[in-house]
């Protein structure tokens, strides 16, 4: 099915956003934020269309738009350690946006961001060399606060994931119990049906045996009279 005009416009704007995200931008640059907001609106409109693309295509568009949103939010954080932590939880696209790409552009942007934040963290650490002793205490105090914030964020994410896994496990156990009850009921029903079939078969064989026995007795009594 041919792509609609809305989808073509979305792909063009997405390529533009991916190209801007890969470039070194001025901190006061605002266009990318506006473009990503427009991408969200176009994606919602595309999902509402009757002749919308396949679910896999829609999911890939959503994945790339969410990545760009997360990248912009990470850039607005204050410290490089917070940026690096937020960057770890971003999920880039899996499929190239255009046929000219060998690797998805969002994956390249993700790797660039990770390298940049790592370099910034290294520069902050190396920048402490040569500072007066009284300033080192202030720096390490700030770094400790950042590490504490990172630990709290990580613990929150782990706790959320743990609760989700616990809920999933509880749901799975509940479904297993229900399936076990259904299987038990069906087994009992099948056993009753089999027992009824066996009973009917025994009665039928008993009737046949009785019929043959009576026939033999009648045949024995009638044969002498015929002679």
Image (cartoon, grey):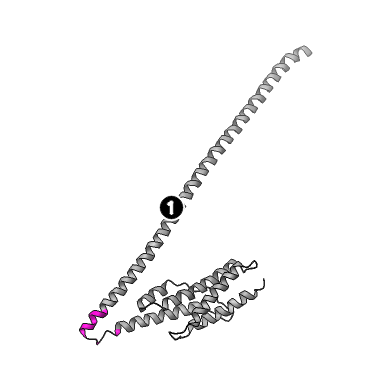
Q: Which residue is mark 1?
A: 170
| Horizontal side, residue 197 vs residue 113: left or right | right
Q: Depth check: give the residue in front, 121 or 145.
A: 145
Residue displayed at 38% across by 64% down = 158
Which element carries disc 1, helix, strand or loop?
A: helix
Residue 155, how many percent across, how many down?
35, 65
Is 43 above or below relative to 185? Answer: below
Residue displayed at 72% across by 16% down = 218
Q: Residues within 10 Å of mark 1 (few under 14, many from 20)?
A: few
Residue displayed at 33% across by 69% down = 151
Q: Which residues are magenta?
A: 126-139
Residue occupying the far right of the picture: 226
**Corner quadrant of residue 82:** bottom left
Task: Check residue 25 for magenta coloring.
Answer: no
Is residue 160 visible to us here? yes
Residue 171, how many percent across, how many down?
46, 53
**The N terminus - image quarter:** bottom right
**The C terminus - image quarter:** top right
Is 102 above or below relative to 186? Answer: below
| Horizontal side, residue 19 vs residue 136: left or right | right
The number of callouts visible is 1
Task: Check residue 130 for magenta coloring.
Answer: yes
| Horizontal side, residue 125 vs residue 57: left or right | left
Residue occupying the far left of the picture: 133
């Amino acid at each position: 099915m041919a792509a609609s005009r809305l989808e073509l416009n979305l792909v063009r704007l997405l390529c533009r956003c991916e190209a801007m995200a890969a470039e070194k931008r001025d901190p006061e640059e605002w266009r990318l934020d506006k473009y990503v907001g427009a991408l969200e609106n176009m994606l919602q409109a595309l999902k509402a269309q009757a002749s919308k693309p396949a679910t896999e295509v829609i999911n890939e568009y959503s994945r790339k738009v969410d990545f760009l949103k997360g990248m912009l939010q990470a850039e607005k954080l204050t410290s490089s350690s917070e940026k690096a932590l937020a960057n770890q939880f971003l999920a880039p696209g899996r499929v190239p946006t255009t046929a000219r790409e060998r690797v998805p552009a969002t994956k390249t942007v993700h790797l660039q961001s990770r390298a940049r934040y790592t370099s910034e963290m290294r520069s902050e650490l190396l920048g402490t060399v040569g500072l007066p002793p009284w300033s080192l205490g202030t720096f390490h105090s700030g770094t400790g606060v950042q590490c504490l914030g990172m630990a709290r964020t990580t613990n929150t994410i782990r706790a959320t994931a743990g609760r989700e896994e616990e809920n999933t496990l509880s749901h799975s156990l509940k479904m297993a119990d229900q399936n076990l009850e259904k299987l038990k009921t069906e087994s009992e029903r099948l056993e009753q049906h089999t027992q009824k079939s066996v009973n009917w078969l025994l009665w039928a064989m008993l009737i046949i045996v009785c019929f043959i026995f009576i026939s033999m007795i009648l045949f024995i009594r009638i044969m002498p009279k015929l002679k």
